Image: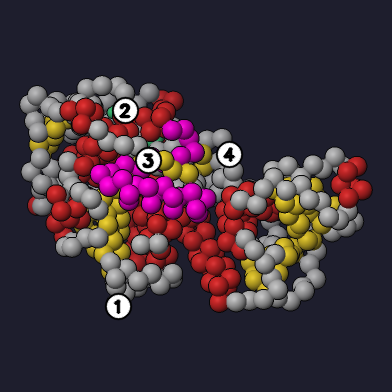
Amino acid sequence: MQLNLTTKNVQTDIEIILVINKQIKSDKNILKKLNFKANDEECVLLVEQKKIYVGCQDNKHDTIRLALSCAIKKLNNTGFKSAKIISNKYIRAIVDGLLLGCYTFNKYKSKKQKQIDKIIYIQAEKITKKNKNEFDEALNICEAVNMVRTMVNTAPDDFYPDIMAVEASNIARENQLECKIYDEEYLKKNGMSAMSAVGRASCHKSKLIHLTYRPINSKKRIVLVGKGLTYDSGGLSLKPSDFMVTMKSDKSGGCAVLGIMSVVSKLNLPFEIHGIVGAVENMIGGDAYKPDDVLIAKNGTTIEIRNTDAEGRLVLADCLCYAQDEIEDIDCILDFATLTGACVVGVGHYTSGVMGNNNQMNYQIVQSALDCGELATSLPFNRYLKKTINSKIADICNISSTRYGGAITAGMFLEHFIKDENKQKWAHIDIAGPAFVEEEWGYNPYGASGAGVRLAIEFIKNL
Ligand code: BES
Ligand code: ZN
Ligand code: ZN
């Protein structure tokens, strides 16, 4: 799709009209005959009038996104080539709705559906620095989200740690980022045996990815860490078959970090930003790490393994240690992970869980999410749950002794690997719910959603 912001009254095949608050202003009779009520997700094409009408029950940005996503799908089902939307407002929401709503993943379809490349115009009265910037920014961010969706959707046989590293180095090259890729040998030499153990039984060797964006006059130093489990079979604590399907999406946190890194230089953000990803495959085999093993993380913490399916926290533990050892004077450190099924049970499929010691920062992250069209909520730590990850034989256990509060106990496990000076600067974002969409919702089609990308950029922009 080609998307343009223009002031010209371009003649297009179709005009898309948003009907906000049920205020139908034109074609009233025919719309009435069609029983068009202008509800959310209600969309009609009037061929003779060359119009697509789409309902928005209110003027919230996410309602506008949803409407545009409906309209573009309608247009894509036709042979019409061009469309315009006349609007001076909601530029970002319009771009988001169009670009995120029309995403499709057809890499594995042998017969690709033929689709005409549509040309869409957003027609505004004036082009100001503000709306042009909003337009360009939204375009770049949506491109990153869709790139993340494609990476996450790619089958695990085609996307393993080596490939993730190649993707990372391509992103680095295209955006003038520094790029370091470390292999197993580095992990072993540097005491990262928790991460290393998780990937041991896989034929695909683990990779530690570190990208850096270093603008001149940087105001802050931000670190993003992502769980990049290119596949999570559960390991010896094997997942039941039904739960294993979709676990290609366990790399969503890592892919989100790569997506964010792909856009920071385009947005000219005035911060030094590090993107660190632990790319690992959790498999079974004679060499697999086992329940009862005790692993030693990079900071010397000994970890009793009681379930090899709680592997993400092991990978993140070492990546968080690596980040804090390698990067000094961190202003903000965020990690993104599809960490727990418990988070999905607790807050639902649509919402990310935000955890950490700094309530104000958690709140800012939640607010950023809501502002940009993602959903997030804060899940508070407490001293009682903290005790449930004590181990009888090691410093800490990789699972909790209680089956309740699993998202929070996983977050508190990670907290163990945050240095004192960073305790107030860190937040953990569990994206297990929204990262992968099994039943399409909003403007998310089936498959990966790219959760975390828009949230992080919105949060960073407001720092
Ligand atoms: N990758 C999973 C978490 C997950 C579950 C992500 C569902 C997306 C959808 C993670 O590695 C895992 O298996 N966690 C276990 C932890 C348990 C063993 C303490 C879980 O949530 O069941
Ligand atoms: Zn797991
Ligand atoms: Zn996992």
Image height of 242 relative to 371, above or below: above
**Dot placed on the residue nearer the N-terminal end, 1 or 3:** 1
Q: Secondary structure at mark 4?
A: loop
In the image, which is nearer the foreground, mark 1 or mark 4?
1
Q: CA distance from mark 3 to mark 2?
A: 13 Å
Left or right of residue 220, residue 192 in this image: left
Q: CA distance from mark 1 to mark 4?
A: 42 Å
Image height of 5 relative to 72, above or below: below
The residue that disc 4 covers is 440
Tag count: 4
Q: CA distance from mark 1 to mark 2?
A: 43 Å
The residue that disc 1 covers is 216
Give yes or no for contact between labels 1 and 3 (Cβ–Cβ under 8 Å): no
Q: CA distance from mark 2 to mark 4?
A: 27 Å
Quadrant containing the N terminus is bottom right
Question: Which circle marks residue 405 in the picture?
Answer: 2
Question: Which circle marks residue 155 in the picture?
Answer: none
Quadrant containing the C terminus is bottom left
Q: What is the three-letter code of the residue carrying label 3?
A: Ser
Q: Quadrant of residue 229?
A: top left
Give yes or no for contact between labels 2 and 4 (Cβ–Cβ under 8 Å): no
Start and end of the magenta stretch? 347-373
